[in-house]
Amino acid sequence: MFALKRSPETSDRELIAAVLDGSDHAFAQLVERYRDRVFRLLGRYCRDAVECEDLAQDVFLKVFRKLHTFQHGSQFFTWLYRITVNAATDHLSRASQKRLRLVEDTAVFERGDERDDDPAAPMHAAELAEVTRRIVDAMPEKFRTILILREFEELSYTEIAAVLDIQLGTVESRLFRARQRFKDALVRQHPELLPIAGGEVAGEARGGKR
């Protein structure tokens, strides 16, 4: 039997090897390590906590069944994210829900907009969050998903390429087009909010990993 280290430093590779060797404990550790991230990502697509919990269980069941196909050519979490995104979009499609119900993290917008001395700041953030949800709701799935992975999950371009199984150049072009669609919609529908948006999702220069 594969000897699993009993250490908080146990790597994903070691856990995977132990799972494939028959260790239920190792799989429980993998689930514990990534459950919150999976649940959070599913929450970008669905507001219902019970529904998200059911989807998370489906995701980890698929992970367990397909773990032998993971080739270690990329990070485990990008492979897991791919399964999660597919599960979420398939679920929405089966339910005939044409609109993605994005639950945004308003901190994304607050980072670039220091308004500590402005008592109206919470109102502005809430208004922008609601507008953002409506705009992203109306986007085609491939643009919604790439915005979620980049702007809300803050994945690097390389990680997004691994999750979506596309070329790095495709990530760049698709993200550019998604941001441009967002910006165009914001300009067209809510030009008064552009200064508040601060260019985050609208496609202005932003920091972070590439």
Image (cartoon, helix red, strand yellow):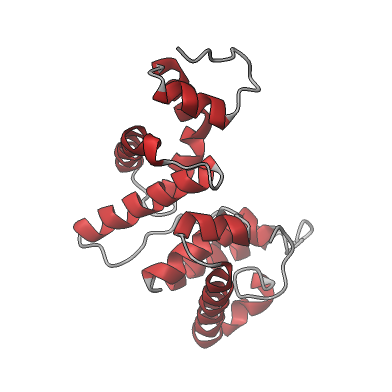
Q: Nearer the viewer, residue 46 or 193?
A: 46
User: If the image is split into quadrants, where does the N terminus sit?
Assistant: top left
**Residue 14 picture location, percent across and down:** 55, 25
Quick check: 165 left or right of 14?
A: left
User: If the image is split into quadrants, where does the C terminus sit?
Assistant: bottom right
**Residue 42 picture location, percent across and down:** 41, 47
> What residue do we see at 47% from left, 42% from top?
71
Q: Nearer the viewer, residue 82 or 130?
A: 82
> What residue do we see at 60% from left, 75% from top?
202
Position above or below: 142 against 73: below
Position above or below: 11 against 101: above
Q: Quadrant of residue 138?
A: bottom left
**Residue 166 picture location, percent across and down:** 48, 65
**Residue 90 picture location, percent across and down:** 28, 55
Q: Nearer the viewer, residue 19 or 82?
A: 19
Quick check: 18 left or right of 159?
A: left
Q: Is residue 63 visible?
A: no
Position above or below: 46 against 27: below
**Farthest residue, direction right:** 117
Q: Nearer the viewer, residue 205 or 17?
A: 17
Quick check: 163 left or right of 199?
A: left
> What residue do we see at 40% from left, 25% from top?
20
Q: Is residue 139 visible?
A: yes
Looking at the rendered structure, the number of numbered marks drawn on it comes to 0
